[in-house]
Amino acid sequence: MECELASVNSNKEEIKNIFESVKTIAVLGLSPDESKASHRVAKYLQSQGFTIIPVYPKEEEILGQKVYRSLAEIPIAVDMVNIFRKPNAFDAIADAAIARGDVKVFWGQLHLVNNAAAQKAKDAGMIVVQNHCSMVEHKALV
């Protein structure tokens, strides 16, 4: 399977600004399994003071936080979506983020790229990051 290259993407200065302004991060695909990247990254971001909102199809609580089944169910403002889902899910995630109206950052984790969904999010006014690990970037830039 050939990977799509990110034609819609942010830069290091924007990424640094993201971490300085974002407070609440919905992590889509946040696994309860501590060995999974989504769990390690979310746990790290939580330890750095970010409010983490797990979005996962199962479980009631992950990292001490209530789990939601979808982005639409989250009752508080969401600054950023951090996506650990397959790229073919990005279109629906972009639509849900746009429908919310409060998401400022659309972030696809390392090796995850969907340029059409990213362009849709960007056109709606979101900052887009693709194919970057939020934990690695935070450690390097902040």
Image (cartoon, rainbow, N blue to C red):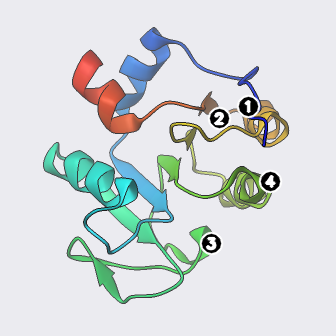
Q: Nearer the N terminus, badge 4 or badge 2?
A: 4
The alpha-carbon separation of the residues under discs 4 and 2 comes to 14 Å
Residue 71 location (% of width, % of height): 58, 68
> What element does badge 4 sit on?
helix
The alpha-carbon separation of the residues under discs 1 and 4 comes to 12 Å
Count the marks.
4
What mark, if any, has residue 104 been given in the picture?
none
Q: Nearer the N terminus, badge 4 or badge 3?
A: 3
Q: Which residue is mark 3?
A: 72
Quarter of the picture holding the C terminus: top left
The alpha-carbon separation of the residues under discs 2 and 1 comes to 5 Å
Q: Residues within 10 Å of mark 2 (few under 14, many from 20)?
A: many
Label 2–label 1 contact, CB within 8 A: yes
Q: Which residue is mark 2?
A: 126
Q: Residue at x 71, y 24 (%)?
A: 6
Residue 126 location (% of width, % of height): 65, 34
Is 97 placed above or below 9 here? below
Which numbered mark, 4 or 2, is in the foreground of this view? 4
Q: Which residue is mark 4?
A: 91
Residue 61 location (% of width, % of height): 30, 83
What mark, if any, has residue 122 been given in the picture?
1
Q: Residues within 10 Å of mark 4 (few under 14, many from 20)?
A: some
Label 4–label 2 contact, CB within 8 A: no
Residue 57 location (% of width, % of height): 54, 82
Quarter of the picture holding the N terminus: top right
